[in-house]
Image (cartoon, rainbow, N blue to C red):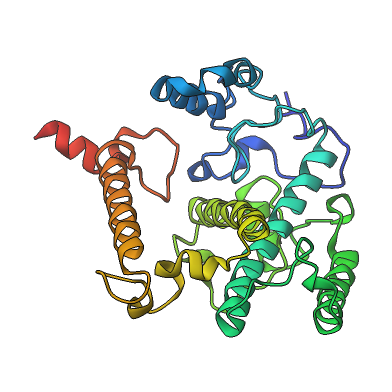
């Protein structure tokens, strides 16, 4: 019998049959799991930090893996507690939206730091009112106007054909298998194949982009709130990340020497411990992340054997 078409028919996207998808892409890797990956991670955090026990009822609501989140798409941890993605049309729309906001946040984080290093003051934003000054407002309107024009041409996802004859990368994605969000067919430096010119390499680059984008979104939000409360530029409060070493206050140098030394020691210690933890316990090949191949567990296997 012929294989049933993939999807629920709410979009124009028509991929190849699942049986023809690239096996190395590790698509649908959570299909047979009842619990979401996000739930397992949160349960581990509750066990490690008893002070978070009050959150357990909320964590339990995330236990069941949403049917549409089967590990096919980049950044999928089975986390959708509010049940937003109920159809392919909605899922693809939210995927496109997340990639768009991730890219804006990464560019915004760079611009935020550049603005503060240049002026020595907090960056203009909604909470401090500087966004409405004429030069800042004009630049904001121009940037978002151009982006909206581009979005009108490219989005929303349900209007995007994603056919194999509409660009090089659409063809590659068609060969790989599932829908891919955020494709502008633009990669002049060929970064997309940096981790391998195959379905696994492209999938891993999309995972990395979303990981950085999600971090940037959370980071920008925290910077805005921090600066609204303290009035101190993030580039000054965490100078170790943004300024040359003689401005860090290390060790006991400069006007903030004592605090800078403590800050530096804490950051280096935390990074060192995390690096050890990842290498010794959690490391997997980034190209085949999450496929549970015991041959790809790297250093942990070597340690166990030794």
Q: Position of residue 12 (x, y in %)?
A: 87, 47
In depth, the one of 46 and 187 nearer the eye is: 46
Q: Quadrant of the C terminus?
A: top left
In depth, the one of 279 and 285 nearer the eye is: 279
In depth, the one of 80 and 12 nearer the eye is: 80
Q: Position of residue 260 (x, y in %)?
A: 34, 64
- Whether residue 14 can be seen here: no
Residue 162, image quadrant: bottom right
Q: Quadrant of the N terminus?
A: top right
Q: Position of residue 207 (x, y in %)?
A: 55, 50
Q: Position of residue 209 (x, y in %)?
A: 57, 57
Q: Is 176 placed above or below 37 here?
A: below
Residue drawn at (58%, 24%) of the image: 36
Q: Is residue 130 left or right of residue 57?
A: right
Which residue is the extreme one toward the front? 255
Q: Is 11 placed above or below 222 here?
A: above
Q: Is 233 placed above or below 28 here?
A: below
In depth, the one of 191 and 265 nearer the eye is: 265
- Whether residue 214 can be seen here: yes
Residue drawn at (59%, 25%) of the image: 31
Residue drawn at (28%, 70%) of the image: 250
Residue drawn at (69%, 38%) of the image: 17
Number of callouts in the render?
0
Residue 297, image quadrant: top left
């Amino acid at each position: 019998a012929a294989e049933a078409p993939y999807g629920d028919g709410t979009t124009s996207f028509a991929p190849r049959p699942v049986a023809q998808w690239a096996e190395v892409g590790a698509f649908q890797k959570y299909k047979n799991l009842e619990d979401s990956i996000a739930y397992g991670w949160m349960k581990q955090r509750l066990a490690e930090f008893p002070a978070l026990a009050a959150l357990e009822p909320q964590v339990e609501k995330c236990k069941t893996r949403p049917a549409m989140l089967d590990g096919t798409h980049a950044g999928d941890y089975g986390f959708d507690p509010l049940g937003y993605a109920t159809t392919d049309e909605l899922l693809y729309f939210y995927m496109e939206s997340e990639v768009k906001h991730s890219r804006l946040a990464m560019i915004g984080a760079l611009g935020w730091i550049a603005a503060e290093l240049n002026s020595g003051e907090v960056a203009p934003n909604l909470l401090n009112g500087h966004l409405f000054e004429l030069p800042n407002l004009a630049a904001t309107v121009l940037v978002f106007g151009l982006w909206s024009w581009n979005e009108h041409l490219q989005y929303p996802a349900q209007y995007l054909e994603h056919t194999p004859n509409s660009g090089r990368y659409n063809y590659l994605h068609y060969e790989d298998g599932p829908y891919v969000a955020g494709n502008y067919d633009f990669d002049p430096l060929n970064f997309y194949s940096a981790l391998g010119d195959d379905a696994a390499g492209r999938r891993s680059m999309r995972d990395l982009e979303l990981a950085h984008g999600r971090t940037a979104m959370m980071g920008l939000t925290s910077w805005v709130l921090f600066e609204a409360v303290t009035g101190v530029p993030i580039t000054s409060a965490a100078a170790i990340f943004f300024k040359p070493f003689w401005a860090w206050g290390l060790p006991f140098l400069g006007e903030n020497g004592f605090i800078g030394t403590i800050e530096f020691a804490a950051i280096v210690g935390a990074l060192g411990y995390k690096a050890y933890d990842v290498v010794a316990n959690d490391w997997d090949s980034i190209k085949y992340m999450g496929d549970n191949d015991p041959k790809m567990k790297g250093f942990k296997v070597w340690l166990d054997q030794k």
